[in-house]
Image (cartoon, grey):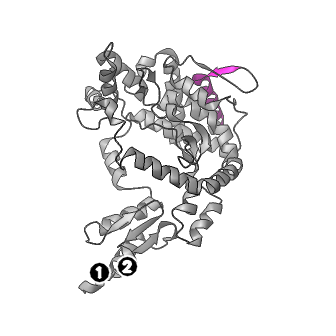
Amino acid sequence: TVRELATDVPTGPPWLESLLTTAARIVAGPLSTLLLIVLWFTAFARIRRELTPFLISRPIVSGSGMIDDQGSFHLSDKAPAMSCLTGLGGWLGSRPIYCLVNFLKPVFAESRLVWQQYRRLFAPRQRLQIALGDSNLADAAEYLRVGTTMLVLDVIEAGEMPSVPRVRRPIRSLRAICSDPTLAARIPLAGGGSATALEIQRFYLEACRRFLERRPDAPAEARDVLRRWEDVLDMLTDDPQGLVGTLDWVTKQFVLDKAGRGAAWEVRKKIDIRYHELSPQGYFQRLRTTGIVLDILERAEIDHARRNPPLGTPATVRGRYIREWAADEELISANWHAVYLGQGRECKVVRLDQVHARPAEQAADQRKRSPRNSDRN
């Protein structure tokens, strides 16, 4: 049954997973705690302060919707699980909005005593990992989730964000927003007063509008994001049902009302899950065939993007190595930072942040210098 899925643990018996997790936390606890304290005061401090109200209110645009164990509908699937603003993503038992575990991995898991890996900890440009964000099926919701966040970050980094409405008890406020599909919930602000998620989103919308007005050479895509953002907020205020096929949580709520009204929890939860199924039997995919879904990209554009990562990124290099070696008998594996060719003592490590030559040529050169290929010759 659906309830039994939550008890399945693919990594082994629950008691063993719990034991190993506890042991790892005990061993790493002191250093992890010290690192977290330092990062709390130094890592993206201004960005986190000015971005948090936006992220807390963003589920009204980008939430995917979810039925909880009590049968209540929430705007977001991930939001109810968040337990703190900033953390190390599980090392200390937290589910943070801002996950700083990428600072911890070079220390514990990826350094292999290579000093260049430690040096990454002090690089002026770091990755901001935001763990609060659902996976969207609706093009418009995904487009706005990424596009609006990029716009807000641009305003913050340019130092042009006006004084933001500081939210009291952010995690509690996030849950209050996501548990109210009517969008009427008011959350307390620091210094008194309150605001709805719609009001907070409009504050950031206006800040981004003023930012773009001062930049006539801004990309057309930025102005398109701003226009779509404003249209969605207007419809959420006046006619939320008009966003069926545009926002996932509105669409899922529509499907649940049509197909699961008055049904048992198990039936409604099955509808919730099957909404996201990518096969033609998935409920969102069925809606797509009716023409009710608002598509932004053509199928050809999607296929091209799947095969062609952005130029000049580690993804480009990683993809070319994988394509070059995919048909070879040599074992190949990759992560965010390196590609590993072969195994054991003969394993060659290609660090993606150190690749300067053309990736295809380097892949071919590594193939020529592979010990196994040398034996063949």
* Residue 151 painted magenta: no
Instruction: Label the magenta part by its dominant secondary structure.
Output: helix
Question: Residue at point 70% right, 52% down?
Answer: 38
| Residue 160 x/y as whole percent | 70, 40
| Residue 360 x/y as whole percent | 37, 70
Say which label, 2 or 1, has the lower sequence index.
2
The amino acid marked with disc number 1 is: Arg
Write down the quadrant of residue 66 in the picture: top left
- Up-down: is 68 above or below 362? above
In the rendered view, does 12 fall on the left or right side of 133? left
Write down the quadrant of residue 263 in the picture: top left
The reply to whether discs 2 and 1 touch (Cβ–Cβ < 8 Å) is: yes
Query: Badge 2 is on which residue?
Result: 346
Q: Residues within 10 Å of mark 1 (few under 14, many from 20)?
A: some
Q: Residues within 10 Å of mark 2 (few under 14, many from 20)?
A: few
Q: Nearer the viewer, mark 2 or mark 1?
A: 2
Q: Which mark is residue 57?
A: none
Nearer to me, 244 or 211: 244
The part of the chain drawn in magenta is 193-211
User: Considering the image in quadrants, where does the N terminus appear?
Assistant: top left
SS at badge 1: helix
Nearer to me, 263 or 295: 263
- The answer to whether residue 98 is visible is yes
Q: Which mark is residue 372?
A: 1
- The answer to whether residue 361 is visible is no
| Residue 225 x/y as whole percent | 51, 36
SS at badge 2: helix
The amino acid marked with disc number 2 is: Glu
Nearer to me, 195 or 344: 344
